[in-house]
Image (cartoon, rainbow, N blue to C red):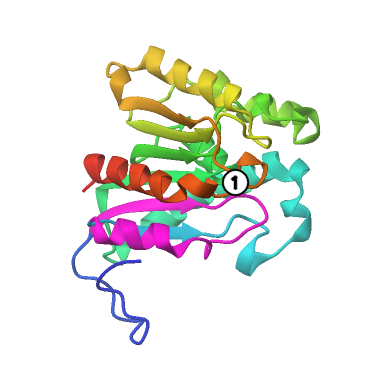
Amino acid sequence: MHPQLDAAAPEAWPTTPLPTVLWLHGRTVTKELDPGRYQRWLAAGMAAIAMDLPGHGERLEAQLQAPGSLAELVDRCAPELDVVADWAQRNGCSLPDRWGIGGMSAGGMVAACRLCQSHRFSVLLLESSTGDLLSLPGAAQRGGQRLAELSPLDHLHDWRDIPTLALHSAKDEVVPVAGTRRFIDALRVRSTHPDRVTLHEWDSTGAPAEHVGFGRVAAEAKELGTRFLQRWLA
C-alpha cells in the first residue's frame, strides 16, 4: 500500500518513496488479513508491504501450515525478505534507509530470525510473537535441532540495536509470554538505549486462545504499533 499506487494503473509506480513496513502474517492465514492495519500506517505517512508466508495465500502448500513447519517457514521466508525489499526500492516505493519489519506469531518469528544477520531494517514490531523459539509448546516437534539453531535468543551476537516493541497477552496459549519476556530482556541488556526496547502486555484480551487479533484491545494494539512505527520511521 502506497498513496501513489493505483490499482487501475498498476504499471505506474510511485515517484515519492516512503518509509516502509514489511509485515508478515501468522501461520494459517494470509497477507490480506486485517487491512485496517495497513490503512493506519498509510495515514501515518508510511507505505506497507505484506507478503504471504511460504505455503500460505497465493502460494498454498498445506503442509507448511502445520505447527511442525516453523523451522522450514523461517528457512524459506527469511531470504525472501531482501528480495521483496530490493524490489520495492527499485520501483520507487520505499526509502532505502527507512525500513521497519514485523509480524504476528510465526511471521514475527521469521522477522526476528532475519535480524540476527546484517540487514537494512531500523525498527521491529512483534505481535503475539517471540524470539525465543524453544519456549514454544512442542518445540521439539516444530523443528527440533533446526529450531534451536534458528532461535534468535541464542544468536544475538550480530543483533543490531534497534527500537523494538512487542505486544502480547499474558495468557497467550499459543506463544507463551514468558519466552517473549526473556527475549525482550536480552535485547534490553544488550541495548545502549534500553528504553527503546519494550514489551507491552495485557492481562487478558478476550481473543481466541488469547492469541489471535487481541480481541477487545485490538484497536489499542493497532494504535500502539502505529505510533511506535511512526515515531522511528515517519
Residue 41 sits in quarter: bottom left
Q: Find disc 1 in the rendering and name its residue.
A: 207
Evaluate whether residue 155 shows in this view.
no
Viewer-side residue, 96 vs 173: 173
Q: Is residue 48 visible?
A: yes
Q: Is residue 73 above or below residue 16?
A: above
Residue at image coords 62%, 65%: 57
Q: Residue at x 53, y 62 (%)?
A: 33
As drawn, 194 above or below 143: above
Q: Secondary structure at mark 1?
A: loop
Extreme-bottom residue of the structure: 8
Q: Residue at x 56, y 38 (%)?
A: 109
Vertical arrangement, residue 233 with respect to residue 38, above or below: above
Residue 215 appears at what percent x and percent y? 54, 48
Residue segment shown in magenta: 18-44
Residue 22: say if magenta: yes
Q: In the drawing, does residue 55 fall left or right of residue 124?
A: right
Quarter of the image for the N terminus: give it: bottom left
The x and y percentages for residue 119 are 39, 38
Q: Residue furthest left?
A: 16
Q: Residues within 10 Å of mark 1 (few under 14, many from 20)?
A: some
Q: Does the stretch in magenta take in 32?
A: yes
Q: Nearer the viewer, residue 228 or 31?
A: 228
- Decide if residue 122 is on the left or right side of residue 202: left
The mark tally for this picture is 1
Front-lying residue, 203 or 117: 203
Residue 214 image position (x, y, % from top left): 52, 45
Instruction: Find residue 147 and report its horizontal and vertical position in percent.
Output: 69, 30
Mark 1: which amino acid? Ala
